[in-house]
Amino acid sequence: MTQSVRYTTADVDGFKLFYREAGASDAPKLLLHGFPSAGHMFRDLIPLLADRFHIVAPDLPGFGQSDMPPREKFSYTFDNVARVIDRFTEIIGFDRFAVYVFDYGAPTGFRLAVRRPERITAIISQRQRLRRRSQRRLDSDQGLLTRPVAGEPRGAPTPAHGQIQNLAEKLPKQQNREFLRRNSEFAREKREFGPTTALSG
């Protein structure tokens, strides 16, 4: 049976975090998306899992419908993103849960597991290889979560998704069409999900 998806926001110590939620099982699963995306990337997966699990897919800080504070007010490092997500799981009542990670969601999820391993029941990793190179990347927050922007010195901290506007121009035509199609789907979902409910900690 297809489960309906709920669209909700949580107040994480003053930070608005948007998330998708479905299912009412006692088997919680946290889905952490990649770049350049949001919890929207799991829109087809969530209903398939929701009859067996309690699924929550947040938009990471700076992505999707979650807050994107300026760099002066928020440090866009994986350590800080993991801190926000860790607190988020406390607010929504996830005491012990499995985490599904993909791309940028992986360093966040791995940090949750390292920081509080007693809370993680399983890690499902999609296309994230833990080799030496990956480990070096995990240890280099600033290089991963920041990108140079035209007019700014190289290495200036920038929210990771700040390059989305220019990304389509750099992709081959076929990839460009796919990128624009997904972006259009995300915009349509944004219009259609209607009012959200708010949860504060």
Image (cartoon, helix red, strand yellow):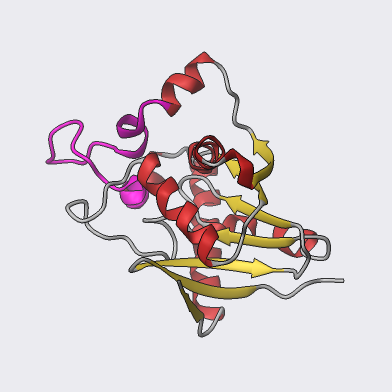
Provide residue 112's location: percent of width, then percent of height: 52, 42
Instruction: Identify the residue at horizontal 41%, vertical 49% (top origin).
Output: 83
Q: Total marks drawn?
A: 0
Residue 52 in which image quadrant? bottom right
Left or right of 188? Residue 124 is right
Q: Which residues are magenta?
A: 139-165
57 or 147, nearer to the observer? 57
Please check the rendered image and state whether residue 159 is part of the magenta-colored stretch, yes or no. Answer: yes
Residue 189 makes an appearance in the image: yes
Please check the rendered image and state whether residue 193 is part of the magenta-colored stretch, yes or no. Answer: no
193 or 7, nearer to the observer? 7
Provide residue 50's location: percent of width, then percent of height: 77, 64
Instruction: Identify the residue at horizontal 43%, vertical 25% (top origin).
Output: 137
141 or 65, nearer to the observer? 141
Q: Quadrant of the N terminus?
A: bottom right
Provide residue 177's location: percent of width, then percent of height: 52, 50
Compared to residue 127, the image places residue 102 above or below, namely: below
Provide residue 13's location: percent of width, then percent of height: 36, 66
Q: Quadrant of the C terminus?
A: bottom left
Left or right of 121? Residue 105 is left
Instruction: Identify the residue at horizontal 62%, vertical 61% (top origin).
Output: 56
Residue farthest along the front direction in this orientation: 118
Residue 100 makes an appearance in the image: no
Residue farthest along the bottom direction in this orientation: 195
Residue farthest along the top direction in this orientation: 132
Compared to residue 154, the image places residue 3 above or below, namely: below
Left or right of 72? Residue 161 is right
Residue farthest along the right direction in this orientation: 1
